[in-house]
């Protein structure tokens, strides 16, 4: 039994990675997985094993044994749009709706604009294979006395989001598909998209620091600078606090942060030194998804994905960092009872991190809050040392529960009196895969030493976290 268990770890775990799912879970497409999809997964799993080996990991260790299967399933689900057809969704969902005489006005099935706002989606960036977040808004103007079922607008949007994408093409494809399938007077699509930045550029637990862009596409009566329908659509978005006119400046910002990396001449043959076996593995994953790795937009994608993964390469060194003992913490005894001096509690809050879920090879990111009893040596430990500690344990294949424990044990190796660590994180594997729990956030707690026996000390530390917290997102 480990040191933290001896101290009776108090954990508040919200199933961060949802990794207890059965391999026999039914696919979102309904029923059992299609034979072609299963064959693609079988071809993808050896590629994932090659990636794990390139990262210096042992695929046989606990936590990684089923990772190839999980990653294959996540990619298969995240690109299910390749196997769906818009006509199957829209067919039978057009309903007659009486309008008004055009000489009188526009309403109902003849010219009455319909806008569905705040459709939350996720897609995979075609430049780096990382998921990105989408807030999608769709409007259309009915014609011929027919309207479409509202859910179909979001479902058609999801078909194209569940493919390797970039924001502008996604907007164009959704707009074109809706115009062709429901034959309205016009369609408008507006997207607000967020791409996760490089790990070192993450700023906090929210989307702050993410790369943001706004894109739109329109057809029919929405086209033209003087279109009143487009103006009405923008006004309907503003009712929800969405100002696309203000957001348009972000379209000039480079979208994918990994595009700055030098790319290969062709997939599998790199200009820069990069693990060729890993690049070849990612290329085979693209083939398994039914994509063409030589498509112009995908050239360089395998290398960029590998370069992202290499930021989380395994480091098994037992080192000392600024006084913290890492990877070699001795067992300590359970503390005695009593109430400690709250004036001796030191806090370092909102330390940002980005780690890679070892179960799905997807990022999770957020903040770490550390509270500890000063050992009487003065002003305490400098914040930069704590940030270095969080970075050490975050930049590798991880699970949130383990990371929380490791940070607590390392701080206790210096403090000796008492430590409390709270980690708050958003898991991409919770919001971009099958469960799609968009607003979910996971918190974990580790409690050692005096914090374990002094409830008032715990409450004091948690109140410090609450007092400095920003608005929930």
Image: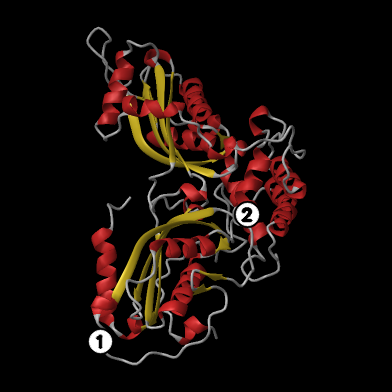
What whole-number distance in Å separates the C-alpha atoms at marks 2 and 1? 48 Å
- Residue in the picture at 34% in, 62% down: 349
Q: Which mark is residue 413?
A: none
Image position of 310 (left or right of 241): right
Q: Which mark is residue 339?
A: 1
Please, is residue 421 above or below residue 119 in the view? Answer: below
- Residue 66 on image: x %, y %: 65, 63
Q: Can residue 108 be seen at all in this image of the molecule?
A: no
Viewer-closest of 323 and 435: 323
Viewer-closest of 84 and 59: 59
- Residue 375 on image: x %, y %: 36, 80
- Residue in the picture at 23% in, 61% down: 467
- Residue 275 on image: x %, y %: 74, 49
Q: Can residue 436 be seen at all in this image of the molecule?
A: yes
**Element type where label 1 sits in the image:** loop
**Element type where label 2 sits in the image:** helix
Quadrant housing residue 52: bottom right
Of pointers 2 and 1, the one earlier in the residue sequence: 2
User: Mark 2: few, some, or many residues within 10 Å (few <14, many ≥20)?
Assistant: many
Report the number of discs.
2
Residue, far top: 103
Please, is residue 86 above or below residue 220 in the view? Answer: below
Quadrant housing residue 191: top left
The residue labelled by disc 2 is 71
- Residue in the picture at 62% in, 38% down: 261
């Amino acid at each position: 039994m480990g040191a933290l268990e001896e101290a009776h770890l108090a954990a508040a775990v919200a199933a961060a990675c949802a990794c207890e799912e059965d391999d026999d879970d039914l696919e979102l497409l309904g029923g059992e997985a299609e034979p072609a999809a299963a064959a693609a997964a079988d071809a993808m799993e050896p590629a994932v094993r090659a990636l794990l080996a390139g990262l210096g990991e042992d695929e046989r260790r606990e936590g990684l044994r089923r990772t190839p299967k999980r990653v294959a399933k996540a990619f298969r689900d995240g690109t299910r749009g390749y196997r769906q057809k818009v006509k199957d969704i829209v067919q039978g969902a057009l309903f007659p709706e009486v309008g008004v005489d055009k000489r009188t006005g526009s309403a109902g099935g003849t010219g009455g604009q319909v806008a569905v706002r705040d459709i939350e989606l996720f897609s995979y960036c075609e430049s780096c294979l990382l998921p990105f977040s989408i807030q999608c808004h769709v409007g259309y103007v009915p014609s011929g006395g027919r309207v479409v079922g509202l859910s179909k607008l979001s479902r058609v949007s999801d078909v194209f989001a569940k493919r390797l994408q970039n924001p502008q093409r996604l907007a164009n494809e959704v707009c074109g598909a809706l115009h062709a399938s429901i034959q309205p007077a016009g369609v408008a699509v507006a997207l607000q998209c967020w791409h996760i930045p490089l790990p070192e550029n993450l700023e906090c637990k929210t989307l702050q620091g993410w790369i943001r862009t706004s894109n739109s596409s329109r057809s029919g009566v929405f086209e033209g600078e003087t279109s009143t329908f487009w103006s009405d659509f923008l006004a309907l978005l503003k009712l929800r606090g969405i100002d696309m006119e203000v957001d348009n400046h972000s379209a000039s910002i480079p979208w994918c942060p990994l595009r700055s990396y030098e790319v290969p001449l062709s997939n599998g043959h790199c200009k820069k030194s990069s693990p060729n076996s890993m690049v070849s593995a990612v290329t085979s994953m693209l083939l398994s998804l039914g994509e063409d790795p030589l498509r112009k937009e995908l050239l360089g994608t395998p290398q960029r994905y590998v370069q992202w993964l290499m930021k989380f390469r395994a480091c098994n060194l037992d080192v000392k960092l600024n006084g913290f003992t890492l990877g070699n913490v001795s067992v300590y005894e359970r503390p005695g009872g009593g109430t400690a001096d709250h004036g001796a509690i030191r806090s370092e809050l909102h330390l940002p991190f980005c780690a890679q879920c070892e179960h799905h090879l997807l990022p999770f990111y957020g903040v770490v809050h550390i509270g500890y009893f000063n050992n009487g040596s003065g002003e305490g430990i400098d914040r930069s040392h704590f940030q270095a500690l969080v970075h050490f344990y975050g930049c590798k294949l991880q699970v949130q529960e383990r990371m929380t424990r490791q940070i607590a044990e390392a701080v206790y190796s210096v403090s000796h009196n008492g430590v409390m660590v709270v980690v708050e994180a958003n898991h991409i594997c919770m919001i971009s895969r099958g469960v799609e729990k968009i607003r979910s956030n996971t918190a974990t707690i580790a409690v050692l030493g005096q914090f374990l026996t002094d409830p008032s000390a715990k409450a004091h530390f948690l109140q410090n976290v609450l007092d400095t917290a920003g608005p929930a997102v």
